[in-house]
Image (cartoon, rainbow, N blue to C red):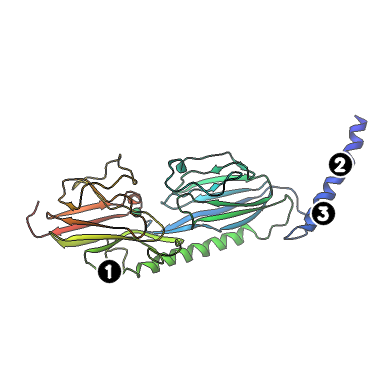
Amino acid sequence: MEILKRQAIPLVALVIAAAAALAGCGPTGTVFQPLRPSSWQVIAGSSSQQEALQALQFFPATITINAGDTVTWTFPAGEPHTVTFLGNGQATPPPPTDPNDAKPAGGSTYDGSTYTSSGFLLRGKSYSLTFTKPGTYSYYCLIHVPEMEGSVVVQPAGYTYPATQAVYGAQAQAGIATALGSATSSIALFPYASGGPQLANGISPGLATGTPAPATVMRFLDGPSLSATSVTVAVGTTVTWTNLSNNAPHTVTFPPAGQTPPPTLSPFSPPSGGSSYDGTTLTNSGVMWPGASYSLTFTKAGSYTYYCLFHDDEGMIGTVNAVGGTPV
Ligand SMILES: [Cu+2]
């Protein structure tokens, strides 16, 4: 017992000296702080205008914490996101089409070794991870790579923090305002005649080309306005939709008139129903990746509601009114 006590004293002194030395060599400061874990907040995505405008980023994208601290991500938008950290030797995240993306993986701590993911979260849900080992860890939203990436920089316990949560919160609010503002601006890029038979299903900064933008508009648009979600055409007209976003897949899906899409129909279901629509047969574009177009000829008069199978929960629903000819 006496021996143990005598050994314990120099050991404690050594640990304090080592920690102080580490803090002194630290990249961000020299003040040694008490080893009390802190909690941090990051916002995963954001939206406005009844989910029409979506910000596809982590706010802030980079946060610096200490080993032992916990980060909590909140998911305020109607569009799902993930917070996903890769395992040892894993170079890239799984693709957005991987069905396992939706499921959570790993535990409540992360040290860089094990694939750890929140799974799909949205509408006020949250996800927390405690970081146990110093390092710089990139993470991804599996649905919105490559535009939605972040990093957590983990310093050794006791290091001085480069910024407070208040600073990160202000960065987050400024970033959200910028992203949603760019989504609003992209609506004015609508390139077709307003009220005509050429529509956009989705639009984003940069339209369908270039680096995926960190914001997108999830609406069917027949003009440069969020309220231009219906089109009126003469029977016999061919309507064409083009995905004018560079960052989100969409579908154009007409269930039989007066019905909603069957729950068994997945957003990744193949095209079906042919090139004309008379209100009787489920007619689906299949997945329309950025830049893809889809045309449908309306052969009978009627008011037809249609859906994006990915984003109808976020209000991506439109109407084609076919008039003249022989009413149904
Ligand atoms: Cu969509």
Q: What is the C-alpha distance between the residues marked 2 and 1?
A: 74 Å
Give SS at disc 1: loop
Query: Residue at left 56%, top 39%?
Result: 106
Asked which quadrant contains residue 54, the reply is bottom left
Percent x, y for residue 70? 62, 47
Dot 2 or dot 3: first in sequence order is: 2
Q: Nearer the viewer, mark 2 or mark 1?
A: 1
Give SS at disc 3: helix
Give SS at disc 2: helix
Query: Residue at left 78%, top 55%?
Result: 23
Q: Of 281 and 16, which appears nearest the observer?
A: 281
Q: Amino acid at mark 3?
A: Ala
Indicate the quadrant of ligand 1 in the picture. Answer: bottom left
* 266 is higher (above) or lower (below) than 166: above
- Residue at mark 1: 192
Percent x, y for residue 272? 24, 46
Q: What is the C-alpha distance between the residues marked 2 and 3?
A: 15 Å
Q: Amino acid at mark 1?
A: Tyr
Q: Amino acid at mark 2?
A: Leu
- Mark 3, residues whose alpha carbon is within 10 Å: few (<14), some, or many (≥20)? few
Q: If the image is split into quadrants, where does the N terminus sit?
A: top right
Q: Nearer the viewer, mark 3 or mark 1?
A: 1
Dot 3 or dot 1: first in sequence order is: 3
- Residue at mark 2: 11
Q: What is the C-alpha distance between the residues marked 3 and 1?
A: 64 Å
Q: Of 310 and 127, which appears nearest the observer?
A: 310
Relative horizontal placement of residue 53, taking residue 242 as reference (left or right): right
